[in-house]
Image (spheres, helix red, strand yellow):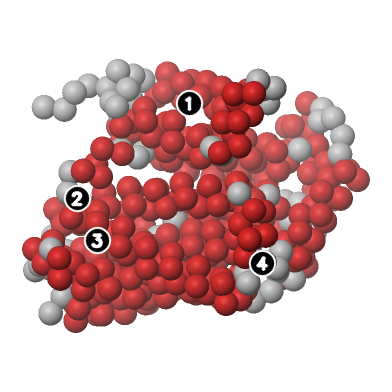
């Protein structure tokens, strides 16, 4: 019998999350030597993610039983994307060059070969872990780690994966992917040190950040109530328009196999695409001046709430419930990371491309902009655009990965 959580009412849980976020941001501004030393090693963003995970892990809150995660994804992520893309400098993003795409594709390749390598490793040391149709369950994980939820569901249907096996790999997905996201957030907080050690060329990224800072300083002002209402109107108006159009667009492609493989039947896919497109379109209009009143800061504030809700969905104890499968997931992720790091070494690519190239695969549109904005709010659209590319590749690459895993499983 599962114990009841200490706190279950969504309003109380939301209030607790805001108190945690407030405490983290308050201590980051503290002049006390302890907090200054603490945040030298522990990124604030990572703490905003892990503290809610601890609430769920120790039964204070039931993350899977609260609607906050779904609310945050459906109602906060779309306006966040619109506000973070509102002031984007598209020519500067284009100047980021081919390395962003190469690192993204390297991440995809790492997932494709990581699955069969993990099976071969475990056939040597623990063959029972990957026996039978385990490779089919891993195919659903490949769909998630290259594309997203729609691609994961497609792989479940394509390979007729048992519900229990599918559930086990959903747990592996949540834990391993979120542990890796924690690593990426640490890399984001320490990217200057990491780039300097590797001699990475950050010229284009630095130029984009400088351009963003110059625009903000040129248009910065103390936001009035009217400014804040206009910012919210743009963000939630774009989200409302996207949601209104997403449902009929997804329905238009219903029942068409090729459309399912490209995620065109997913309402979430169209919501992300339309919201991002509206934000990019508005960046060419006078609406871009709302950045001077703090449009990206409002978007970032909503993003931190989303981060806390994502963390609330993670149970650290589940790592120990089926350690064999989690071991498979960790080996798989290690291969993915190794391919990315080796490619970045060859190209002298900055840490930003490593982190976003990975998360655009592993986390898709829900978390790729989270990692990208950890570097700078101006970079969030890069994460979104790469994640959308992942939706298109997800089913095809996952199918190839599944066939390789079938062979590796014997």
Q: Give the foreground label among 4 and 2.
A: 4
What secondary structure is marked by label 4?
loop
| Quarter location, residue 274 | bottom right
Q: CA distance from mark 3 to mark 4?
A: 32 Å
Tell me where residue 84 appears, x and y as whole percent: 67, 48
Q: Quadrant of the N terminus?
A: top left
- Residue annotated with mark 2: 323
- Left/right placement of residue 375 relative to residue 119 reads right
Label 3 neighbour load within 10 Å: few <14, some 14-19, many 20+: many
Q: Give the foreground label among 3 and 4.
A: 4
As drawn, 295 above or below 288: above
Q: CA distance from mark 4 to mark 2?
A: 37 Å
Label 1 neighbour load within 10 Å: few <14, some 14-19, many 20+: many
- Residue at 53% from the left image edge and 48% from the top image edge: 185
Which of disc 1 and disc 3 is earlier in sequence?
Answer: 1
| Quarter location, residue 169 | bottom left
Which of disc 1 and disc 2 is earlier in sequence?
Answer: 1
- Residue at 26% from the left image edge and 80% from the top image edge: 404
- Left/right placement of residue 76 relative to residue 69 reads right
Label 2 neighbour load within 10 Å: few <14, some 14-19, many 20+: few
- Residue annotated with mark 3: 328
- Residue at 38% from the left image edge and 53% from the top image edge: 177
Q: CA distance from mark 4 to mark 1?
A: 37 Å
- Residue annotated with mark 1: 17
Question: What number of labels is visible?
Answer: 4
Q: CA distance from mark 2 to mark 3?
A: 9 Å
- Residue annotated with mark 4: 200
As drawn, 116 above or below 7: below
């Amino acid at each position: 019998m599962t114990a009841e959580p200490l706190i279950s009412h969504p309003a109380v849980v939301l209030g607790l999350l805001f108190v945690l976020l407030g405490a983290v941001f308050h201590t980051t501004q503290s002049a006390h030597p302890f907090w200054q030393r603490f945040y030298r090693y522990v990124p604030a963003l990572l703490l905003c993610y892990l503290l809610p995970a601890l609430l769920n892990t120790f039964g204070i809150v039931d993350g899977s039983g609260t609607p906050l995660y779904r609310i945050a994804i459906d109602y906060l992520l779309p306006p966040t994307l619109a506000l973070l893309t509102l002031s984007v400098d598209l020519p500067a993003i284009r100047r980021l060059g081919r390395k962003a795409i190469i690192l993204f594709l390297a991440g995809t390749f790492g997932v494709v070969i990581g699955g069969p390598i993990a099976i071969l490793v475990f056939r040597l040391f623990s063959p029972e872990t990957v026996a039978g149709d385990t490779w089919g369950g891993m195919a659903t994980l490949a769909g998630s780690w290259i594309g997203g939820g729609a691609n994961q569901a497609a792989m479940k249907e394509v390979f007729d994966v048992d519900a229990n096996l599918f559930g086990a790999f959903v747990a592996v997905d949540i834990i391993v992917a979120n542990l890796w996201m924690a690593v990426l957030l640490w890399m984001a907080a320490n990217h200057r040190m990491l780039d300097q050690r590797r001699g990475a060329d950050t010229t284009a990224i630095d130029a984009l950040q400088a351009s963003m800072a110059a625009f903000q300083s040129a248009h910065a002002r103390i936001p009035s109530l009217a400014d804040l209402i206009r910012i919210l109107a743009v963000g939630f108006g774009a989200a409302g328009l996207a949601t209104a159009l997403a449902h009929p667009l997804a329905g238009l492609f219903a029942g068409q196999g090729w459309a399912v493989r490209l995620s065109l039947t997913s309402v979430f896919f169209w919501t992300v695409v339309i919201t991002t497109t509206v934000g990019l379109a508005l960046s060419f209009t006078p609406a871009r001046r709302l950045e001077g009143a703090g449009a990206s800061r409002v978007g970032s504030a909503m993003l931190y709430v989303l981060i806390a809700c994502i963390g609330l969905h993670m149970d650290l104890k589940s790592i120990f419930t089926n350690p064999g499968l989690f071991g498979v997931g960790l080996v798989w992720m290690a291969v993915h990371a190794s391919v990315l790091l080796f490619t970045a070494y060859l190209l002298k690519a900055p840490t930003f491309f490593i982190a976003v190239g990975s998360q655009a695969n592993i986390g898709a549109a829900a978390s790729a902009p989270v990692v990208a904005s950890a570097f700078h709010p101006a970079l969030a659209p890069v994460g979104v655009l790469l994640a959308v590319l992942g939706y298109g590749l997800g089913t095809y690459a996952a199918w190839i990965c599944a066939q390789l895993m079938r062979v590796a499983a014997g």
